[in-house]
Amino acid sequence: MRDTESGGGYEDGGGYEDGSGGGYEGGGGYEDGYEDGYEDEGARTGLGVLPGDRLSYGMQVPVTSLSTLYAEPWEVEAGPRELREVARAADRLGFAYLATCDHVAVPARLAAAMGTVWYDPVATLAHLAAVTERTLLLSHVAVAALRHPLALAKQYATVDRLADGRLVLGVGAGHVREEFEALGVDFARRGAVLDETVDALKAALGPAEFPEFSGRRFAFRGLGQGPRPVRTPRPPLWVGGSSPAALRRAALKADGWLSQGDRREALPRRVATLRRLREEAGLDGPFAVGAIAEPLYVGTPAWDTGAGTLTGAAGTVAESLRVYRGMGVDQVQVRFRCRGVGELLAQMEVFAELVGPLLLD
């Protein structure tokens, strides 16, 4: 059955969770202070965290989610050492962000496609914070409705503090019914729960030591919570998913949209919907729109990388990716086909050195 709330993946059939891959629109001004695609360390203010003069690029970290739908075979035997190598390289090379997914548990009926190895995103991002200095750290996505927003805010505020203000909190509705049932959350109402959770998170992650919120499901006041996030007024909050409900949630409640692997031809329609909803609501602040690119390999591979892989010289790859910019996309999530961590690091290097500069406006 198609998960009509998230719009991403399938409830029966081993798809991705709502927004577990990457996406954004350029609808507002971004703050000043960028060098080589990075924000100045002393400028952790505002909700726009991407430079406005280029198509930014980030990546989902390997090793931490072993879905057969996108993980490479070598990741099965890899571990934290390889994860740290990739994170340090991304930080050095100017990748805009590193992202990680979220599943509490995977039911047996989906395990063949999804696997059961899904590192906890909070623990993973905290670990990445310790080995990076500049790249943003993105949850793509946290299934926020599975947790109380005050507890979620505590976890991610701590990550933002450990990362010196580099957190981007991506949230989505989720699609695995059994996860919700095991944790006592109404799967059928997860969209409504997420809507209120987003509102509560915006309050709980703000500057107030004693945040206040009152909703139908959640309410808190008079409860001090520290540490507070480094970024002011709060960390950016991006919403994932491609259903009408997810697009509306992103446009009206969030600071960015995370595509759920939409095909290129679908993106202009998604971006137009986001723009229309924001214009109708009179919203004109920073809003980041992103996409997930096809798997890619810079150069001529000496092995079969698959029919759907974007390959070729740096100029060819850059020309293909620049099409996203013309659609109104601000950041694209890239995934490199590779047979081991060494080849992945080499691909990241050549991409950053030869393709990245060609993505400037």
Image: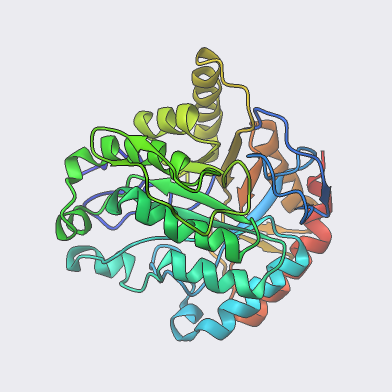
How far across and down, in percent of the image, does residue 356 sit? 78, 54
Residue found farthest to the front: 222
Residue 313 in the figure: left or right of residue 152:
right
Residue drawn at the location 83% of the way across and 55% of the way down: 36
How far across and down, in percent of the image, does residue 154 sit? 43, 57
Residue drawn at the location 38% of the way across and 60% of the way down: 102
In this view of the protein, can residue 207 be seen by the observer? Answer: yes
Question: Which quadrant would residue 248 be assigned to in this image?
Answer: top left
Residue closer to the observer: 321 or 119: 119
How far across and down, in percent of the image, does residue 343 sit? 66, 77
Quarter of the C terminus within the rendering: top right
How far across and down, in percent of the image, does residue 182 sit? 16, 60
Residue drawn at the location 30% of the way across and 54% of the way down: 147
Residue 314 in the figure: left or right of residue 270:
right
In this view of the protein, can residue 339 be seen by the observer? Answer: no
Residue closer to the observer: 181 or 262: 181
Quarter of the N terminus within the rendering: top left
